């Protein structure tokens, strides 16, 4: 890990949380939102509505949403690297309250739009004037059976401040406050969770086990609080889903992703039915490592001698080289991200663990957070998040703000594709057989983590939500469900799952921050494999199609986007093709290992 603290520059938004322009912008957007409310409310669902009127109002609504979003982005990004800073925490809370006020003023607009009769709606939406807002209106129309009255929606917005949002905030702050006392080579250190988790990749089996136990023990000490947070957030989601007439709790997420319940269920079943691949791989890894038993703390154990450490600039140069081979503009985007300091790199106290990419302003560049520790996994993670950044760049460049989003179904396409490009590049350099085995293990493990492990998380979520409909589960019941899914995933390849891993259900933020988010990783990963195979077949011909796909934002549904590439999300054989590709990589590894013996 570099000693220099490399952090992002958020001045695209503001200089600091005390920037005087913040208050000016807050007052401006509050005033604009209130004026919009006074001018438009009650006038949307009228027989005389014209496309010109609706277009003007949509543009006003869009401008308010954009200005409000930038305040939210800045608050969220500032907080993600300063979770223990009281000034930043206060600012984030203030922006959350302001956001609710703004939403309260403009909430009527999508609700009233859905009161327009079908005949009038079809007449209006057919106008060429509304072409770039067509999909936004159609998505809103699909929410019609699930929308409540304006008063009810306003109450939900207000109560969330001290309800669901407060629990999510407590979860994040509690996690971020954890500092771990850990001994390495006789030296006592105080580590963040990201720094401690890096030891899961250490060659020393005992050190790996101590690192995992140190993490989970901290959660075990606080499991009463985590259980309370867990149950309240999940119950809130389920009650809200039932109140809004969704068929199942997951249907609410599926609709927001513009996916059918059927497509998600097919994906889950095909993935679950192929867990044998995971068991086969880890039994093979057990053999490679020469271990009698493989514990859950060994799943990231390094194979071979890839001990090279990368500085952050070296990692950026490698990724730029990889991207240039695909398309020169990709290299330029990464270069500008680096030059503009839109990447927060260094792990430190008060910074969120993990990695993510967030939108910036339209026509500008997004922002990436990683916890870079210099190993090959950090390089691949950086490549993954910069893949997100490439996609967000194209969306911000080509779309208006209401289409400036991305469905979870395709959210991981660019990121996983970029990671595959990086691995492919590394595999085709002058490597020894041992190094190829090591890199192939990294590839397979990343895909197991992205597809099969996330599918196990999805199965766990479904079962917990089913359970919580009947009763609030106890701490032990939550942990037991989690262990059951992990045992199904790993089969006979992993020992001591219950003893070492049960509390890990509380470590994973997606269950709480975005219920049913996790299946999107699996879906995107298997989609990427299909796209990558297409790229290997078509080469240069594929590039413009891929860039077009990346630039669509939410202007089309995922099904519409992918149909141009003849991909059917409801076809189980399509998902099986991606899984068969992963199985072939395990076979390839097995052959390399046999030839090495």
Image (tube, grey):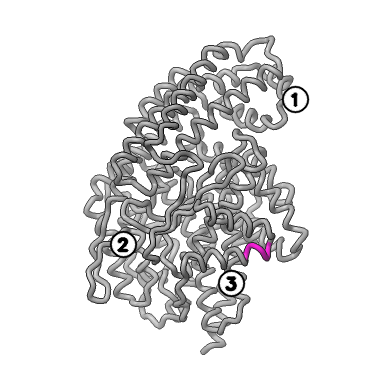
**CA–CA distance between discs 1 and 3?**
49 Å
Q: Which range is magenta?
A: 322-326
User: For the N terminus, which image quadrant?
Assistant: bottom left
Examine the structure image and report whether residue 323 is included in the region drawn in magenta.
yes
Mark 2 vs 3, N-terminal side? 2
Q: Label 1: which residue?
A: 126
Q: Label 2: which residue?
A: 498
x then y, percent, for residue 32: 51, 20
- Quadrant of the image occupied by residue 328: bottom right
Mark 1 vs 3, N-terminal side? 1
Query: In terms of secondary structure, what is the magenta stretch mainly?
Result: helix
Report the residue that reaches farthest toward the bottom: 597
Residue 149 seen: no
Examine the structure image and report whether residue 261 is included in the region drawn in magenta.
no
Q: Which secondary structure lies at badge 1?
A: loop
Q: Label 3: which residue?
A: 585
Q: Which residue shows up at 46% across the image and 81% down it? A: 305
- Quadrant of the image occupied by residue 16: top left
The answer to whether residue 562 is left or right of residue 84 is: right
Q: Which residue shows up at 69% across the image and 10% down it? A: 48
Residue closest to the eye, 119 or 423: 423
**CA–CA distance between discs 1 and 2?**
58 Å
Mark 1 vs 2, N-terminal side? 1
């Amino acid at each position: 890990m570099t000693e220099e603290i490399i952090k992002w520059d958020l001045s695209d938004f503001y200089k600091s949380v005390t920037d005087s322009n913040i208050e000016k912008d807050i007052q401006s957007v509050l005033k604009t939102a209130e004026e919009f409310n006074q001018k438009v409310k009650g006038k949307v669902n009228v027989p005389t509505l014209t496309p010109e009127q609706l277009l003007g109002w949509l543009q006003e609504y869009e401008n308010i949403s954009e200005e409000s979003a930038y305040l939210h982005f800045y608050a969220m990004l500032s907080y993600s690297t300063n979770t223990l800073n009281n000034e930043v925490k206060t600012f984030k809370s203030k922006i959350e309250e302001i956001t609710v006020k703004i939403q309260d003023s403009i909430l009527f607009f999508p609700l009233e739009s859905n009161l327009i009769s079908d005949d009038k709606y079809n007449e209006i939406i057919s106008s060429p004037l509304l072409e770039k807002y067509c999909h936004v209106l159609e998505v809103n129309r699909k929410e019609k059976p699930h929308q409540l009255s304006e008063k009810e929606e306003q109450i939900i917005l207000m109560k969330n401040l001290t309800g669901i949002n407060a629990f999510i905030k407590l979860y994040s702050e509690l996690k971020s406050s954890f500092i771990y006392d850990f001994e390495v080579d006789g030296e006592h250190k105080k580590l963040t969770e990201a720094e401690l988790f890096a030891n899961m990749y250490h060659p020393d089996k005992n050190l790996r086990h101590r690192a995992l136990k140190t993490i989970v023990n901290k959660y075990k000490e606080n499991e009463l609080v985590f259980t309370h947070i867990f149950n309240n957030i999940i119950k809130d989601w389920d009650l809200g889903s039932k109140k809004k007439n969704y068929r199942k709790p997951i249907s609410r997420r599926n609709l927001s992703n513009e996916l059918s319940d059927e497509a998600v269920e097919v994906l889950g079943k095909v993935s679950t039915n192929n867990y044998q691949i995971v068991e086969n791989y880890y039994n093979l890894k057990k053999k490679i490592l020469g271990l009698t038993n493989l514990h859950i703390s060994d799943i990231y154990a390094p194979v071979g001698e890839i001990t090279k450490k990368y500085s952050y600039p070296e990692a950026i140069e490698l990724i730029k080289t990889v991207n240039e081979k695909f398309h020169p503009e990709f290299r330029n985007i990464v270069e500008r991200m680096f030059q503009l300091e839109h990447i927060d790199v260094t792990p430190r106290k008060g910074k969120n663990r993990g990695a993510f990419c967030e939108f910036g302003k339209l026509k500008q560049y997004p922002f990436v957070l990683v916890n870079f520790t210099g190993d090959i996994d950090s390089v691949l993670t950086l490549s993954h998040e910069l893949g997100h950044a490439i996609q967000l760049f194209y969306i911000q460049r080509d779309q208006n703000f209401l289409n400036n989003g991305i469905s979870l179904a395709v959210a991981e396409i660019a990121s996983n594709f970029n990671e595959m490009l990086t691995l492919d590049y590394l595999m085709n350099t002058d490597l020894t057989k041992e190094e190829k085995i090591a890199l192939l293990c990294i590839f397979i493990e990343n895909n197991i983590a992205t597809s099969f492990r996330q599918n196990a998380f999805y199965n766990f979520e479904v079962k917990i939500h089913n359970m919580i409909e009947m009763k609030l589960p106890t701490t032990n019941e939550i942990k037991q469900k989690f262990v059951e899914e992990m045992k199904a995933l790993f089969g006979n390849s992993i020992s001591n799952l219950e003893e070492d891993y049960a509390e890990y259900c509380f470590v994973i933020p997606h269950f709480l921050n975005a219920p049913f988010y996790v299946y999107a990783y699996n879906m995107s990963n298997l989609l990427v494999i299909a796209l990558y195979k297409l790229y290997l077949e078509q080469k240069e011909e594929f590039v413009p199609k891929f860039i077009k796909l990346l630039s669509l934002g939410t202007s089309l549904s995922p099904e519409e986007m992918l149909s141009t590439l003849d991909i059917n999300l409801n076809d189980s054989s399509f998902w099986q093709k991606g899984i068969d590709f992963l199985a072939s990589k395990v076979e390839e590894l097995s052959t390399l290992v046999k030839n090495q013996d």
